[in-house]
Image (cartoon, rainbow, N blue to C red):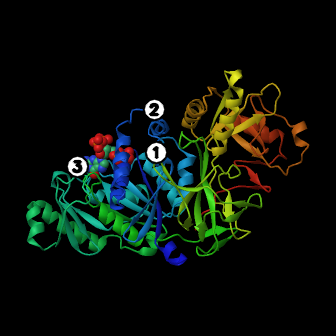
Amino acid sequence: MGIREEIQRRRTFAIISHPDAGKTTLTEKFLLYGHAVQLAGSVTARKNQRQSTSDWMELERKRGISISSTVLQFDYDGFRINLLDTPGHQDFSEDTYRVLTAVDAVVMVIDAAKGIETQTRKLFEVCRRRHIPIFTFMNKLDRPTKDPLELLDELESVLKIEACPMNWPLGNGFEFRGVFDRMTRQAHLFEYGSSGSYRAPVEIASLADPLVRERLSEGTHRRLLEEIEILDHAGTRFDPEGAATGKITPVFFGSARNNFGVQLLLDGFLAHAEPPQPRKSNGSFIPVESGFSGFIFKIQANMDPRHRDRIAFLRVCSGKFTRDMTAVHAQSGKEIRLSNAAKMFGRDRETVDEAYAGDIIGFVGQSSLSIGDTLTETPGIMYREIPRFPPECFALLFNPNPSKFKRFREGVDQLLQEGVVQGLQPRNASQQVPVLAAVGPLQFEVFQYRLENEYGAEARLEQAEWKFLRWVNPQADRAWAASVVLPTGTILADDARGQTVILFPGDWALSVFSEKNPSILLGDLPFENGIESEEVSAR
Ligand code: G4P
Protein backbone atom coordinates (compact mmCIF):
# COMPACT_ATOMS: atom_id res chain seq x y z
CA MET A 1 0.00 0.00 0.00
CA GLY A 2 1.35 3.42 -0.88
CA ILE A 3 1.71 6.30 1.53
CA ARG A 4 -1.46 7.98 0.25
CA GLU A 5 -3.58 4.86 0.80
CA GLU A 6 -2.06 4.31 4.24
CA ILE A 7 -2.91 7.84 5.35
CA GLN A 8 -6.38 7.80 3.79
CA ARG A 9 -7.34 4.71 5.78
CA ARG A 10 -6.37 6.22 9.12
CA ARG A 11 -8.92 7.56 11.58
CA THR A 12 -7.59 9.04 14.83
CA PHE A 13 -10.10 9.98 17.49
CA ALA A 14 -10.96 10.11 21.17
CA ILE A 15 -14.12 9.40 23.11
CA ILE A 16 -15.25 12.16 25.46
CA SER A 17 -17.95 11.90 28.09
CA HIS A 18 -19.02 12.70 31.59
CA PRO A 19 -17.97 9.88 33.98
CA ASP A 20 -20.35 6.91 33.83
CA ALA A 21 -21.95 7.82 30.52
CA GLY A 22 -20.44 4.67 29.00
CA LYS A 23 -17.05 5.59 27.55
CA THR A 24 -15.32 2.44 28.81
CA THR A 25 -18.15 0.21 27.67
CA LEU A 26 -18.16 1.77 24.22
CA THR A 27 -14.37 1.48 23.95
CA GLU A 28 -14.69 -2.17 24.81
CA LYS A 29 -17.29 -2.77 22.11
CA PHE A 30 -15.22 -0.93 19.51
CA LEU A 31 -12.31 -3.18 20.37
CA LEU A 32 -14.48 -6.22 19.84
CA TYR A 33 -15.10 -5.03 16.31
CA GLY A 34 -11.37 -4.73 15.92
CA HIS A 35 -10.97 -8.30 17.22
CA ALA A 36 -8.94 -7.13 20.19
CA VAL A 37 -11.07 -9.30 22.38
CA GLN A 38 -8.91 -10.22 25.34
CA LEU A 39 -8.04 -6.67 26.13
CA ALA A 40 -11.66 -5.66 25.88
CA GLY A 41 -12.34 -7.93 28.83
CA SER A 42 -9.64 -6.19 30.81
CA VAL A 43 -11.01 -2.78 30.04
CA THR A 44 -14.19 -3.70 31.83
CA ALA A 45 -12.25 -5.23 34.70
CA ARG A 46 -10.89 -1.78 35.40
CA LYS A 47 -14.34 -0.67 36.39
CA ASN A 48 -14.61 -3.11 39.24
CA GLN A 49 -12.06 -1.21 41.23
CA ARG A 50 -13.53 2.19 41.03
CA GLN A 51 -13.41 3.06 44.71
CA SER A 52 -10.28 5.17 44.69
CA THR A 53 -9.95 8.89 45.16
CA SER A 54 -8.79 9.78 41.69
CA ASP A 55 -8.67 8.23 38.28
CA TRP A 56 -4.92 8.24 38.31
CA MET A 57 -4.75 6.08 41.39
CA GLU A 58 -7.21 3.69 39.93
CA LEU A 59 -5.09 3.66 36.85
CA GLU A 60 -2.05 3.08 38.94
CA ARG A 61 -3.60 -0.09 40.32
CA LYS A 62 -4.56 -1.10 36.86
CA ARG A 63 -1.20 -0.24 35.37
CA GLY A 64 -1.34 -3.40 33.33
CA ILE A 65 -3.87 -1.78 31.08
CA SER A 66 -2.90 1.87 31.05
CA ILE A 67 -5.42 2.61 28.39
CA SER A 68 -6.15 5.89 30.02
CA SER A 69 -2.79 7.23 29.11
CA THR A 70 -2.24 5.94 25.68
CA VAL A 71 -3.70 4.85 22.42
CA LEU A 72 -5.36 1.73 21.16
CA GLN A 73 -4.72 0.85 17.55
CA PHE A 74 -6.82 -1.64 15.67
CA ASP A 75 -8.01 -2.48 12.18
CA TYR A 76 -11.63 -2.64 11.13
CA ASP A 77 -13.13 -2.85 7.68
CA GLY A 78 -9.95 -1.73 5.96
CA PHE A 79 -9.45 1.23 8.31
CA ARG A 80 -6.55 1.64 10.70
CA ILE A 81 -8.09 3.14 13.81
CA ASN A 82 -6.19 5.03 16.51
CA LEU A 83 -8.40 5.49 19.55
CA LEU A 84 -6.92 7.82 22.14
CA ASP A 85 -8.32 7.75 25.60
CA THR A 86 -8.88 11.05 27.37
CA PRO A 87 -8.07 10.85 31.06
CA GLY A 88 -11.32 11.11 32.96
CA HIS A 89 -10.20 13.39 35.79
CA GLN A 90 -13.00 15.42 37.24
CA ASP A 91 -10.51 18.24 37.46
CA PHE A 92 -9.95 20.58 34.60
CA SER A 93 -6.93 18.86 33.17
CA GLU A 94 -4.32 20.04 30.72
CA ASP A 95 -3.62 16.44 29.96
CA THR A 96 -7.03 15.95 28.46
CA TYR A 97 -6.69 19.07 26.38
CA ARG A 98 -3.36 17.94 25.03
CA VAL A 99 -4.75 14.59 24.00
CA LEU A 100 -7.41 16.45 22.06
CA THR A 101 -4.73 18.24 20.05
CA ALA A 102 -3.64 14.86 18.72
CA VAL A 103 -7.00 13.67 17.40
CA ASP A 104 -8.90 14.39 14.19
CA ALA A 105 -12.39 13.78 15.60
CA VAL A 106 -14.21 12.85 18.79
CA VAL A 107 -17.11 10.65 19.71
CA MET A 108 -19.12 12.29 22.48
CA VAL A 109 -21.02 9.79 24.61
CA ILE A 110 -24.13 11.07 26.37
CA ASP A 111 -26.23 9.19 28.88
CA ALA A 112 -29.63 9.66 27.25
CA ALA A 113 -31.37 9.63 30.62
CA LYS A 114 -29.28 12.52 31.86
CA GLY A 115 -28.55 14.61 28.80
CA ILE A 116 -25.55 16.92 28.73
CA GLU A 117 -23.51 16.92 31.94
CA THR A 118 -20.77 19.27 33.15
CA GLN A 119 -17.68 17.35 32.07
CA THR A 120 -19.14 16.80 28.61
CA ARG A 121 -19.72 20.50 28.28
CA LYS A 122 -16.14 21.38 29.23
CA LEU A 123 -14.64 18.86 26.86
CA PHE A 124 -17.02 19.88 24.12
CA GLU A 125 -15.88 23.49 24.50
CA VAL A 126 -12.29 22.51 23.74
CA CYS A 127 -13.35 20.52 20.71
CA ARG A 128 -15.36 23.43 19.44
CA ARG A 129 -12.50 25.87 19.86
CA ARG A 130 -10.31 23.59 17.81
CA HIS A 131 -13.07 22.88 15.25
CA ILE A 132 -12.79 19.18 15.88
CA PRO A 133 -15.56 17.14 14.21
CA ILE A 134 -17.87 15.71 16.88
CA PHE A 135 -19.98 12.58 16.55
CA THR A 136 -22.59 12.05 19.25
CA PHE A 137 -23.65 8.72 20.70
CA MET A 138 -26.82 8.81 22.81
CA ASN A 139 -26.26 5.85 25.08
CA LYS A 140 -28.34 3.67 27.41
CA LEU A 141 -31.46 3.62 25.25
CA ASP A 142 -32.33 0.32 26.91
CA ARG A 143 -33.32 2.36 29.96
CA PRO A 144 -35.96 5.07 30.12
CA THR A 145 -34.44 8.18 28.57
CA LYS A 146 -35.31 11.77 27.95
CA ASP A 147 -37.41 12.35 24.87
CA PRO A 148 -35.09 11.97 21.84
CA LEU A 149 -36.33 15.22 20.29
CA GLU A 150 -35.58 16.96 23.58
CA LEU A 151 -32.09 15.50 23.54
CA LEU A 152 -31.51 17.01 20.11
CA ASP A 153 -32.82 20.35 21.37
CA GLU A 154 -30.44 20.16 24.29
CA LEU A 155 -27.48 19.68 21.96
CA GLU A 156 -28.58 22.72 20.01
CA SER A 157 -29.46 24.97 22.94
CA VAL A 158 -26.80 24.00 25.50
CA LEU A 159 -23.89 23.23 23.21
CA LYS A 160 -24.98 25.44 20.34
CA ILE A 161 -24.24 22.84 17.71
CA GLU A 162 -26.62 21.70 15.02
CA ALA A 163 -27.62 18.10 15.58
CA CYS A 164 -28.39 15.76 12.72
CA PRO A 165 -29.77 12.38 13.76
CA MET A 166 -28.27 9.71 11.53
CA ASN A 167 -30.56 7.15 13.08
CA TRP A 168 -33.57 7.26 15.33
CA PRO A 169 -34.57 4.99 18.21
CA LEU A 170 -37.45 2.54 17.80
CA GLY A 171 -38.98 2.96 21.24
CA ASN A 172 -37.08 3.52 24.44
CA GLY A 173 -36.46 1.85 27.78
CA PHE A 174 -38.15 -1.54 27.96
CA GLU A 175 -39.63 -0.93 24.57
CA PHE A 176 -36.37 -0.13 22.81
CA ARG A 177 -36.32 -2.41 19.80
CA GLY A 178 -33.69 -0.94 17.55
CA VAL A 179 -32.92 2.07 15.42
CA PHE A 180 -34.10 3.42 12.09
CA ASP A 181 -31.18 4.29 9.85
CA ARG A 182 -32.22 7.56 8.21
CA MET A 183 -29.59 7.30 5.50
CA THR A 184 -30.60 3.87 4.18
CA ARG A 185 -34.25 4.17 5.37
CA GLN A 186 -33.98 0.77 7.01
CA ALA A 187 -35.02 -0.30 10.50
CA HIS A 188 -32.44 -2.35 12.43
CA LEU A 189 -34.26 -4.52 14.92
CA PHE A 190 -32.17 -5.82 17.78
CA GLU A 191 -32.63 -8.82 19.95
CA TYR A 192 -31.93 -8.79 23.65
CA GLY A 193 -30.07 -11.42 25.55
CA SER A 194 -26.89 -11.12 23.55
CA SER A 195 -24.99 -8.80 25.87
CA GLY A 196 -21.26 -8.77 25.25
CA SER A 197 -21.47 -10.78 22.06
CA TYR A 198 -19.44 -9.66 19.11
CA ARG A 199 -22.46 -8.05 17.56
CA ALA A 200 -26.08 -7.95 18.63
CA PRO A 201 -28.24 -10.01 16.29
CA VAL A 202 -30.01 -7.67 13.95
CA GLU A 203 -32.90 -7.96 11.55
CA ILE A 204 -33.17 -5.34 8.87
CA ALA A 205 -36.53 -4.31 7.47
CA SER A 206 -38.20 -1.31 5.92
CA LEU A 207 -40.44 0.78 8.15
CA ALA A 208 -43.51 -0.49 6.32
CA ASP A 209 -42.56 -4.10 7.04
CA PRO A 210 -45.05 -5.87 9.34
CA LEU A 211 -42.07 -7.04 11.40
CA VAL A 212 -41.45 -3.47 12.56
CA ARG A 213 -45.08 -2.94 13.37
CA GLU A 214 -45.20 -6.23 15.33
CA ARG A 215 -42.24 -5.39 17.52
CA LEU A 216 -43.61 -2.07 18.69
CA SER A 217 -46.78 -1.15 20.51
CA GLU A 218 -49.31 0.71 18.44
CA GLY A 219 -48.63 4.01 20.21
CA THR A 220 -44.86 3.76 19.85
CA HIS A 221 -45.16 2.83 16.20
CA ARG A 222 -47.40 5.79 15.46
CA ARG A 223 -45.12 8.14 17.33
CA LEU A 224 -42.10 6.81 15.49
CA LEU A 225 -43.68 7.54 12.11
CA GLU A 226 -44.58 11.05 13.25
CA GLU A 227 -41.10 11.75 14.60
CA ILE A 228 -39.46 10.55 11.43
CA GLU A 229 -41.72 12.79 9.41
CA ILE A 230 -40.86 15.77 11.61
CA LEU A 231 -37.15 15.08 11.19
CA ASP A 232 -37.45 14.64 7.45
CA HIS A 233 -39.23 17.94 7.07
CA ALA A 234 -37.83 20.13 9.78
CA GLY A 235 -34.65 18.41 11.01
CA THR A 236 -31.07 19.47 10.29
CA ARG A 237 -29.92 18.02 6.98
CA PHE A 238 -26.72 16.06 6.96
CA ASP A 239 -23.93 18.10 5.47
CA PRO A 240 -20.51 16.43 5.28
CA GLU A 241 -18.71 19.79 5.25
CA GLY A 242 -20.58 20.94 8.37
CA ALA A 243 -19.71 17.68 10.11
CA ALA A 244 -16.05 17.94 9.08
CA THR A 245 -15.70 21.39 10.60
CA GLY A 246 -17.62 20.66 13.79
CA LYS A 247 -20.65 22.81 12.93
CA ILE A 248 -22.99 19.84 12.80
CA THR A 249 -22.84 16.78 14.97
CA PRO A 250 -24.14 13.54 13.47
CA VAL A 251 -26.14 11.82 16.22
CA PHE A 252 -26.47 8.07 16.73
CA PHE A 253 -28.65 6.28 19.27
CA GLY A 254 -28.02 2.95 20.94
CA SER A 255 -26.89 0.99 23.93
CA ALA A 256 -23.21 0.32 24.41
CA ARG A 257 -23.78 -2.34 27.05
CA ASN A 258 -26.07 -4.34 24.78
CA ASN A 259 -23.98 -3.63 21.72
CA PHE A 260 -27.02 -2.09 20.02
CA GLY A 261 -26.29 0.55 17.47
CA VAL A 262 -22.56 0.43 18.12
CA GLN A 263 -21.72 -0.91 14.71
CA LEU A 264 -23.93 1.68 13.04
CA LEU A 265 -22.06 4.33 15.02
CA LEU A 266 -18.68 2.91 14.07
CA ASP A 267 -19.60 2.51 10.40
CA GLY A 268 -21.19 5.97 10.28
CA PHE A 269 -18.22 7.49 12.00
CA LEU A 270 -15.75 5.86 9.63
CA ALA A 271 -17.77 6.87 6.60
CA HIS A 272 -18.00 10.54 7.59
CA ALA A 273 -14.92 11.28 9.71
CA GLU A 274 -12.04 12.56 7.67
CA PRO A 275 -8.60 11.03 7.39
CA PRO A 276 -5.71 13.14 8.78
CA GLN A 277 -5.77 16.69 7.41
CA PRO A 278 -2.85 19.08 6.88
CA ARG A 279 -1.78 20.85 10.06
CA LYS A 280 -0.50 24.38 10.34
CA SER A 281 3.16 25.30 10.74
CA ASN A 282 4.26 28.94 10.64
CA GLY A 283 1.11 30.02 8.88
CA SER A 284 1.04 27.40 6.13
CA PHE A 285 -0.48 23.95 5.94
CA ILE A 286 1.86 20.99 5.65
CA PRO A 287 0.50 18.39 3.19
CA VAL A 288 -0.03 15.04 4.90
CA GLU A 289 1.90 13.21 2.19
CA SER A 290 5.08 15.27 2.54
CA GLY A 291 8.10 14.19 4.61
CA PHE A 292 7.75 12.86 8.13
CA SER A 293 6.77 15.39 10.80
CA GLY A 294 4.87 15.40 14.07
CA PHE A 295 4.67 16.89 17.54
CA ILE A 296 4.93 15.62 21.10
CA PHE A 297 1.62 15.94 22.93
CA LYS A 298 2.27 13.92 26.02
CA ILE A 299 5.11 12.74 28.18
CA GLN A 300 4.74 10.09 30.75
CA ALA A 301 7.23 8.58 33.16
CA ASN A 302 7.03 5.04 34.48
CA MET A 303 4.17 3.73 32.42
CA ASP A 304 5.42 0.30 33.15
CA PRO A 305 6.78 -0.10 36.67
CA ARG A 306 9.05 -2.91 35.45
CA HIS A 307 11.03 -0.40 33.40
CA ARG A 308 11.72 2.97 34.95
CA ASP A 309 11.43 5.04 31.84
CA ARG A 310 9.92 8.02 30.19
CA ILE A 311 7.86 7.96 27.05
CA ALA A 312 7.24 10.89 24.77
CA PHE A 313 4.11 10.44 22.63
CA LEU A 314 4.18 11.90 19.16
CA ARG A 315 1.30 12.47 16.81
CA VAL A 316 2.50 11.95 13.25
CA CYS A 317 1.16 14.90 11.22
CA SER A 318 2.69 14.14 7.85
CA GLY A 319 4.52 11.47 5.93
CA LYS A 320 5.96 8.18 7.00
CA PHE A 321 8.03 7.31 10.02
CA THR A 322 10.53 4.50 9.72
CA ARG A 323 12.46 2.96 12.55
CA ASP A 324 15.86 4.51 13.27
CA MET A 325 15.34 7.39 10.85
CA THR A 326 16.85 10.75 11.71
CA ALA A 327 14.76 13.88 12.09
CA VAL A 328 15.37 17.46 13.10
CA HIS A 329 14.26 18.44 16.58
CA ALA A 330 12.82 21.82 15.58
CA GLN A 331 13.20 23.47 18.98
CA SER A 332 16.95 22.84 19.24
CA GLY A 333 17.78 22.50 15.56
CA LYS A 334 19.62 19.25 16.32
CA GLU A 335 19.30 16.00 14.42
CA ILE A 336 18.00 13.07 16.45
CA ARG A 337 18.05 9.40 15.57
CA LEU A 338 14.56 8.09 16.23
CA SER A 339 15.31 4.75 17.73
CA ASN A 340 13.28 3.09 20.48
CA ALA A 341 9.92 3.89 18.97
CA ALA A 342 7.13 1.85 20.47
CA LYS A 343 3.46 1.24 19.98
CA MET A 344 1.58 0.46 23.16
CA PHE A 345 -1.39 -1.73 23.57
CA GLY A 346 -2.18 -2.14 27.22
CA ARG A 347 0.89 -3.56 28.88
CA ASP A 348 2.47 -4.76 25.71
CA ARG A 349 4.91 -2.74 23.77
CA GLU A 350 5.74 -3.43 20.23
CA THR A 351 8.57 -1.88 18.28
CA VAL A 352 7.26 0.36 15.54
CA ASP A 353 8.92 -0.18 12.19
CA GLU A 354 6.76 2.27 10.35
CA ALA A 355 3.96 4.69 11.06
CA TYR A 356 1.99 7.20 9.00
CA ALA A 357 0.25 10.52 9.44
CA GLY A 358 -2.51 9.97 11.99
CA ASP A 359 -0.60 7.40 14.04
CA ILE A 360 0.74 7.87 17.55
CA ILE A 361 4.18 6.61 18.47
CA GLY A 362 5.91 6.55 21.81
CA PHE A 363 9.63 7.32 22.05
CA VAL A 364 11.14 5.57 24.99
CA GLY A 365 13.94 7.29 26.89
CA GLN A 366 14.46 10.27 24.56
CA SER A 367 15.18 12.74 27.32
CA SER A 368 15.62 15.71 25.01
CA LEU A 369 11.96 15.74 23.96
CA SER A 370 9.46 18.01 25.69
CA ILE A 371 5.74 18.57 25.30
CA GLY A 372 4.98 20.67 22.25
CA ASP A 373 8.25 19.83 20.45
CA THR A 374 8.27 19.17 16.72
CA LEU A 375 10.23 16.42 14.98
CA THR A 376 10.55 16.79 11.25
CA GLU A 377 12.42 15.51 8.23
CA THR A 378 11.88 18.83 6.51
CA PRO A 379 13.69 21.65 8.31
CA GLY A 380 11.59 24.72 9.04
CA ILE A 381 8.43 22.96 10.16
CA MET A 382 7.27 23.81 13.66
CA TYR A 383 3.82 22.92 14.97
CA ARG A 384 2.29 25.00 17.71
CA GLU A 385 -0.58 22.76 18.58
CA ILE A 386 -0.30 22.52 22.32
CA PRO A 387 -2.41 25.03 24.17
CA ARG A 388 -1.16 26.30 27.46
CA PHE A 389 -3.25 27.18 30.43
CA PRO A 390 -2.26 29.59 33.14
CA PRO A 391 -1.91 27.78 36.48
CA GLU A 392 -4.41 28.67 39.17
CA CYS A 393 -3.27 26.51 42.10
CA PHE A 394 0.02 26.77 43.95
CA ALA A 395 1.75 24.70 46.62
CA LEU A 396 5.10 24.70 48.40
CA LEU A 397 7.08 21.50 47.99
CA PHE A 398 9.05 20.18 50.99
CA ASN A 399 11.28 17.15 51.28
CA PRO A 400 10.72 15.71 54.76
CA ASN A 401 13.60 13.18 54.38
CA PRO A 402 16.85 14.97 53.59
CA SER A 403 18.64 11.59 53.47
CA LYS A 404 16.59 10.70 50.38
CA PHE A 405 17.48 13.93 48.63
CA LYS A 406 18.72 12.27 45.44
CA ARG A 407 15.56 10.25 44.89
CA PHE A 408 13.43 13.23 45.70
CA ARG A 409 15.28 15.40 43.18
CA GLU A 410 15.17 12.77 40.46
CA GLY A 411 11.45 12.16 40.97
CA VAL A 412 10.59 15.84 41.03
CA ASP A 413 12.65 16.55 37.91
CA GLN A 414 11.09 13.71 35.94
CA LEU A 415 7.53 14.47 36.95
CA LEU A 416 7.98 18.16 36.18
CA GLN A 417 9.23 17.20 32.73
CA GLU A 418 5.85 15.64 32.03
CA GLY A 419 4.62 19.20 32.12
CA VAL A 420 1.30 18.81 33.95
CA VAL A 421 2.68 20.47 37.06
CA GLN A 422 5.17 23.32 36.69
CA GLY A 423 8.05 24.03 39.06
CA LEU A 424 8.93 27.62 40.02
CA GLN A 425 11.97 28.75 41.98
CA PRO A 426 11.40 31.84 44.14
CA ARG A 427 14.11 34.51 43.80
CA ASN A 428 13.91 35.75 47.33
CA ALA A 429 16.64 34.22 49.52
CA SER A 430 14.26 33.72 52.43
CA GLN A 431 11.80 31.75 50.28
CA GLN A 432 13.90 28.92 48.88
CA VAL A 433 11.32 26.14 48.83
CA PRO A 434 10.22 25.38 45.25
CA VAL A 435 6.68 26.26 44.31
CA LEU A 436 4.50 23.91 42.30
CA ALA A 437 1.90 25.40 40.00
CA ALA A 438 -0.97 23.55 38.32
CA VAL A 439 -4.29 24.17 36.68
CA GLY A 440 -6.27 21.99 39.12
CA PRO A 441 -5.56 20.85 42.70
CA LEU A 442 -5.92 17.17 41.83
CA GLN A 443 -2.63 17.43 39.96
CA PHE A 444 -0.80 17.99 43.25
CA GLU A 445 -2.36 14.91 44.76
CA VAL A 446 -1.25 12.89 41.76
CA PHE A 447 2.24 14.41 41.88
CA GLN A 448 2.70 13.53 45.54
CA TYR A 449 1.30 10.06 45.09
CA ARG A 450 3.53 9.27 42.14
CA LEU A 451 6.62 10.69 43.81
CA GLU A 452 6.15 8.27 46.64
CA ASN A 453 5.07 5.27 44.59
CA GLU A 454 7.38 5.57 41.65
CA TYR A 455 10.45 7.09 43.27
CA GLY A 456 10.08 6.10 46.93
CA ALA A 457 10.34 9.77 47.89
CA GLU A 458 7.93 11.27 50.34
CA ALA A 459 6.92 14.87 49.86
CA ARG A 460 5.03 17.36 51.93
CA LEU A 461 2.90 19.87 50.09
CA GLU A 462 1.66 23.01 51.69
CA GLN A 463 -1.05 24.97 49.99
CA ALA A 464 0.15 28.43 49.06
CA GLU A 465 -1.97 31.54 49.07
CA TRP A 466 -1.13 32.90 45.63
CA LYS A 467 -4.08 33.09 43.32
CA PHE A 468 -2.41 33.49 39.94
CA LEU A 469 0.83 34.34 38.22
CA ARG A 470 2.00 36.50 35.38
CA TRP A 471 5.03 36.19 33.14
CA VAL A 472 7.28 39.20 32.67
CA ASN A 473 8.23 39.95 29.08
CA PRO A 474 11.88 38.82 28.91
CA GLN A 475 12.61 41.62 26.46
CA ALA A 476 11.77 44.15 29.12
CA ASP A 477 14.59 46.25 30.47
CA ARG A 478 16.82 43.90 32.52
CA ALA A 479 17.27 46.52 35.20
CA TRP A 480 13.61 46.53 36.19
CA ALA A 481 13.95 43.80 38.83
CA ALA A 482 16.23 45.93 40.99
CA SER A 483 13.78 48.78 41.25
CA VAL A 484 10.53 46.80 41.16
CA VAL A 485 7.94 47.55 43.82
CA LEU A 486 6.15 44.42 44.99
CA PRO A 487 2.85 44.54 46.88
CA THR A 488 2.63 42.51 50.12
CA GLY A 489 2.58 38.75 49.56
CA THR A 490 3.75 39.09 45.96
CA ILE A 491 7.00 37.36 44.94
CA LEU A 492 9.29 36.96 41.94
CA ALA A 493 10.28 33.49 40.73
CA ASP A 494 11.90 31.75 37.77
CA ASP A 495 10.06 29.18 35.67
CA ALA A 496 11.74 26.05 34.23
CA ARG A 497 13.01 27.99 31.22
CA GLY A 498 14.41 30.80 33.35
CA GLN A 499 11.68 33.30 32.53
CA THR A 500 10.61 35.59 35.32
CA VAL A 501 7.18 35.13 36.79
CA ILE A 502 5.35 37.08 39.47
CA LEU A 503 3.04 35.30 41.90
CA PHE A 504 0.14 37.42 43.11
CA PRO A 505 -2.07 36.86 46.17
CA GLY A 506 -5.09 38.49 44.50
CA ASP A 507 -6.44 40.93 41.94
CA TRP A 508 -5.77 43.88 44.22
CA ALA A 509 -2.04 43.04 44.25
CA LEU A 510 -1.96 42.97 40.46
CA SER A 511 -3.63 46.39 40.29
CA VAL A 512 -1.17 47.84 42.80
CA PHE A 513 1.72 46.29 40.89
CA SER A 514 0.60 47.67 37.53
CA GLU A 515 0.11 51.10 39.02
CA LYS A 516 3.55 51.19 40.64
CA ASN A 517 5.40 49.54 37.73
CA PRO A 518 3.61 50.76 34.60
CA SER A 519 6.50 49.96 32.24
CA ILE A 520 6.60 46.23 33.00
CA LEU A 521 4.71 44.16 30.43
CA LEU A 522 3.01 41.10 31.91
CA GLY A 523 1.43 38.10 30.19
CA ASP A 524 -0.87 35.24 31.27
CA LEU A 525 1.42 32.77 29.53
CA PRO A 526 5.16 32.49 28.88
CA PHE A 527 6.56 34.72 26.16
CA GLU A 528 8.21 33.31 23.06
CA ASN A 529 10.61 35.70 21.36
CA GLY A 530 8.86 38.55 23.10
CA ILE A 531 5.40 37.40 21.99
CA GLU A 532 2.96 35.88 24.40
CA SER A 533 2.35 32.28 23.39
CA GLU A 534 -1.16 31.26 22.48
CA GLU A 535 -3.23 28.38 21.34
CA VAL A 536 -3.10 27.91 17.60
CA SER A 537 -6.00 26.14 15.98
CA ALA A 538 -5.35 23.10 13.83
CA ARG A 539 -7.48 24.32 10.98
P1 G4P B 1 -17.46 5.66 31.78
O1 G4P B 1 -16.28 4.91 31.22
O2 G4P B 1 -17.98 6.71 30.86
O3 G4P B 1 -17.26 6.17 33.16
O4 G4P B 1 -18.70 4.64 31.87
P2 G4P B 1 -18.76 3.05 31.84
O5 G4P B 1 -18.53 2.53 30.47
O6 G4P B 1 -17.95 2.49 32.91
O7 G4P B 1 -20.29 2.85 32.18
C1 G4P B 1 -20.85 3.27 33.41
C2 G4P B 1 -21.99 2.35 33.79
O8 G4P B 1 -23.00 2.44 32.80
C3 G4P B 1 -21.58 0.89 33.86
O9 G4P B 1 -22.37 0.30 34.86
C4 G4P B 1 -22.01 0.36 32.51
O10 G4P B 1 -22.27 -1.03 32.50
C5 G4P B 1 -23.29 1.14 32.31
N1 G4P B 1 -23.65 1.23 30.88
C6 G4P B 1 -22.87 1.48 29.81
N2 G4P B 1 -23.59 1.43 28.68
C7 G4P B 1 -24.85 1.14 29.04
C8 G4P B 1 -26.06 0.92 28.31
O11 G4P B 1 -26.11 1.00 27.09
N3 G4P B 1 -27.16 0.65 29.04
C9 G4P B 1 -27.16 0.55 30.41
N4 G4P B 1 -28.29 0.27 31.01
N5 G4P B 1 -26.03 0.73 31.12
C10 G4P B 1 -24.90 1.00 30.45
P3 G4P B 1 -21.78 -0.14 36.25
O12 G4P B 1 -22.94 -0.39 37.14
O13 G4P B 1 -20.74 0.83 36.69
O14 G4P B 1 -21.04 -1.44 35.93
P4 G4P B 1 -21.62 -2.86 35.47
O15 G4P B 1 -23.08 -2.88 35.83
O16 G4P B 1 -21.42 -2.94 34.02
O17 G4P B 1 -20.79 -3.81 36.21
Gap between marks 2 and 3 measured at Cα? 29 Å
Q: Residue 53 carries which label?
A: 2
Secondary structure beneath label 3: loop
Q: Nearer the viewer, mark 1 or mark 3?
A: 1
- Label pair 2/1, CB-CB below 8 angstroms: no
468 displayed left or right of 114: right
Viewport quadrant of the C terminus? bottom right
Would you say the beta carbon of the disc 3 residue lies within 8 angstroms of ligand 1? yes
The image quadrant of residue 528 is bottom right
Secondary structure beneath label 1: loop
Would you say the beta carbon of the disc 1 residue lies within 8 angstroms of ligand 1? yes
196 displayed left or right of 367: left
Tag 3 residue: 143
Gap between marks 2 and 1 measured at Cα? 12 Å
- Residue nearest the viewer, comparing 148 with 59: 59
Residue at image location 75% in from the left, 45% down from the top: 471
Task: Name the residue type under label 1.
Answer: Gly
Dot placed on the residue nearer the N-terminal end, 1 or 3: 1
Report x, y in % for residue 239. Answer: 40, 74
Q: Judge whether 536 appears above or below 447 on screen.
A: below
Q: Judge whether 519 appears above or below 287 on screen.
A: above
Task: Name the residue type under label 3.
Answer: Arg
Crowd tier of the residue under label 1, counting other residues whose Cα lies within 10 Å: few below 14, some 14–19, many 20 or above: many
Report x, y in % for residue 237. Answer: 35, 73
How many tags in the picture?
3
Residue at image location 38% in from the left, 47% down from the top: 43
Crowd tier of the residue under label 2, counting other residues whose Cα lies within 10 Å: few below 14, some 14–19, many 20 or above: few
Gap between marks 1 and 3 measured at Cα? 24 Å
- Residue nearest the viewer, comparing 279 with 519: 279
Task: Name the residue type under label 2.
Answer: Thr
Tag 1 residue: 88
Secondary structure beneath label 2: loop
